[in-house]
Each structure stands twice: as C-alpha cells, then as structure tokens.
Image: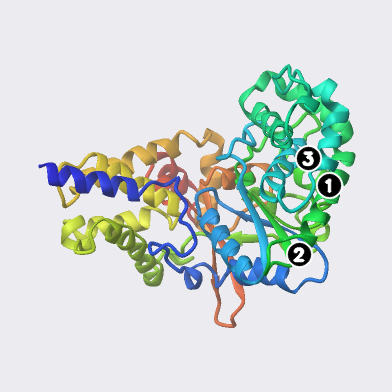
Amino acid sequence: MAQNTDILRRLFNVFDPFRPLPAGDPAYVECREVRGDGDILMQLGKEIEYADRMTCQLYAGHRGAGKSTELRRLQQYLDSQGFFVVYFDGDDQGDIDPEDVQYTDILLACTRHLLEALKDNASPRPLLDWLKNLWEDLQDLAQTEVSLESLSIEGQISQFGKLTANLKAEPSLRRRIRERVNPHTTTLTGALNEFINEAKKNLPTGYSQLVVIADSLDRIARVIQEDGRSSHDHIFIDRSEQLKKLDCHVVYTVPISMVYSDRATDVRDIYGTDSQVLPMIMVQTPDNQRHEPGVEKVKELIAKRISQVDASLSLEPDIFAESKALEGLCLVSGGHVRNLLSLMKEAIKYTDSLPIPTRAIQRSISEARNTYRNNVYDDQWQPLARVYLNKQIIHDEMHRSLLFSRCILEYRCLDAEGEIKCWYDVHPLLKGTKEFQDNFAKIQP
C-alpha cells in the first residue's frame, strides 16, 4: 500500500498544471505539426535575431496552452545566439494582480527585474536618482520610514521591489501609487533606457544584445472601463508607445482576446508584425472527426510525464485499465495542455491503486464540466452552439469573452495548399452539457 501511495503522490505532482517545463526538459513534446506548423523559435526568435532595430512583439494564446514552456524554449534559443535574456513571470513573481493591472505596474515590474539582473553590468544611478526625486511622495507607499540616502545601493534597489509588491498585495495602495508614479512614467522610461544602454555595453562575454520577456500578462482580466473599452485596449493599445519604448527587444504575452479586438489591425500596425498565437493541439478536425496525430501527441505528453515517475509504467494497462478511458480523456481535454494535466491530477486524487479506475476519470471530467458550465451565461449557449456548427466566431464582445474564458478554443492547421487555416470550436467539456445540446438542437439546419 505504501508503495502505491508513493507512486500516486509522484504522479500527482508530475501532472501539476501550474508548473511550466524548463527548456530542455525530457517531458517536453514537440507539437508543431498539430498546432498549425507554428514555432516560437522561428516566429519570435528570428524576428529578434534578424532585426536591425529593437523589436516589441506580442505572444498570445489561451491561458494554460503552454506559452510559458514555449517562452522558456525561446529564452534558451536566444541565449545560444548571444542575447542576454531577462525573463520574468509577472503574476508568479509578485509584480501584478491579474484582476487589476495598469501600464504603470508593467513598467515598474520591468524596471525591477532589469535592475536585479543587470545591477553588476551598469550603474543603477539614473534609476535611483529618479526614485530619490519621488521618494518624499513614495516613501509611505513603500511602507518604510528609512531615508533613501541611508540605504546601500542594494537597499535602494530593493525599494522598486517593494513598490511592485505593494501594487499586487495591497489593493488600497494601488490607486495612490499609480497616481504618484503616472505623471513620471516618461522620466522613469528615460532613466531605465539610460541604465539599459550602459548595461548593453557591459554584458557578459558572448552576449551582444538584451531581451526582456514579460510573461503572464495574458492573465490580465478583461474589464470594461467607463469609456466602454476594455482594460486590454487601455494597456496594449493606448499605452503601446510606452510599451515599445524600452531600448531593448521585448516580448509581452497578451490575452488571446486581444488578437480578436475590433482594433486588431491597429495592433498589427502598432507593433509592426502579427501577434503570434499558440493554438490548441488539434485532437479533432473541423468536421468533428478524431485527428489521430493530435491524439497521439496528447498520449505522448501523458506518457512522458509518467516516465519521469517510473519508465516501466505503460499507458495501458498500467495507468489506464481501458483504452476507451484514455481516448476519452485526450478528446475531452480539447488539446488544452493545462486542462489535460488538471484532469489527470484530479483523477489521481480519486485513485487508491493503479490503474486509474475509469470512474475516477469520469468524476474528474464531470467536475471540470460543471466548472465550465458555471462559466457560461444563459444568453451565451446559442452562440456557442453556432460556433460548434460553423467553426467560426463573430468578432464581438461576447465571443472575445468566451475566448478569454476558454469556452471557445482556437485551432490551426495547414490546408492542402500549405496555407494556415484558423478555426474554432466549443470546449469539449461544454459539449456534454444539457444546455449546449438543447441549444444545438434548436439551430441544426
């Protein structure tokens, strides 16, 4: 029994859906051919590698699709090409609260991480002078009574971290911090660029350029403001010039709904290239047929995680007693990596010994289905049924919201002429609900 418990515990943890794989991890599965032939190393990496000017690129996709894992691959690739990469996860590292974010928060987060990564390559004096000029206004908001002059350089640098930490942890301070910093973002950017340019001249041997990757900005909640426009528009469009102003290459993750904003063409014009999108693993075709290559990739993803626990364990019959249960799990995930990992993790919780009972898998699916069902409003069921029927979306507020909540998933594939075909489908978890089936029955031709 103890041996079973140990194996189940280890399996439970290798299917942790909130632990992106580091670059080169043996559990990584190359899914390019079932994701529309997209490759972050070509799409974002070559843009940075070949450009004569500093670039600013957006990387979109459903939350949990695997963007962080791909960005770590990009970091490793750029590092091998002589680019010094400063990567940070804005949500995980305490920089932003996804439910309440403004441009100021992102700028302070970039400043904090660049300072920490490059303090030995350039004098932080321009940034510390900027902070010193505002210290009388900001001292109480950093929740410290010490004078800046009394602190060491390291201590002064840490004050940027305190400001970003308070932006996330102290909702009552956010408005006050932003009110005091907002009028000075131009001078902060100027000071940051002065620091960046000195740092670029003194990068470690083998590096010639600097790249910042700001991850987890795709989690920023879509909030409609008083002017009728979304928080996403205010950050990535209204503040685009400031986002682009850093004197280094920058990659920002953005919510997938930004790509389908009514100003999507403006986004392309502003950033000079199409936003790159990481779609789902295609486990079904647009005509609702099982897509064998995609299903096999999902099985490979499960198998590689299992092999980290015990390489002798097989998918069948060691982990799954029935092939039908394995197939059903692959299909109901919709090719969404985090959903797949979550379904496996939950099923393991209801397992006392291997193989995982089919009833445990069914319970995991049922609970996930209820979660998704509760995320759909009454007036959204029929539009979802039409997406399933037509495999297309309308570019309106409702469909952007359904994309952001992952009720609608995006897929890409190559057609017979080698052109990329983009299509959409309802998350398979929702297809099994009575509400969806009733509404689909109403609209069938």
Q: Secondary structure at mark 3?
A: helix
Measured as percent of width and height from the top left, residue 319 is found at 20, 56
**N-term-proximal mark, 3 vs 1:** 3
Spatial separation of the CA atoms under disc 3 and disc 2: 20 Å
Name the amino acid, label 1: Gln
Taking 70 as reference, is 94 above or below it? above
Which residue appears at 33% of the width and 59% of the height?
A: 302
Spatial separation of the CA atoms under disc 3 and disc 1: 12 Å
321 to the left or right of 143? left
- Give the numbered dot on residue 242: 1
309 to the left or right of 357? right
**N-term-proximal mark, 3 vs 2:** 3
Residue 421's image quarter? bottom right
Residue that badge 2 annotates = 273
Question: Which quadrant does the N terminus fall into?
Answer: top left
**N-term-proximal mark, 2 vs 1:** 1
Which residue appears at 16% of the width and 58% of the height?
A: 318
Residue 132's image quarter? top right
Residue that badge 3 annotates = 234
427 to the left or right of 45? left
Please say whether residue 266 is visible from this viewpoint. Answer: no
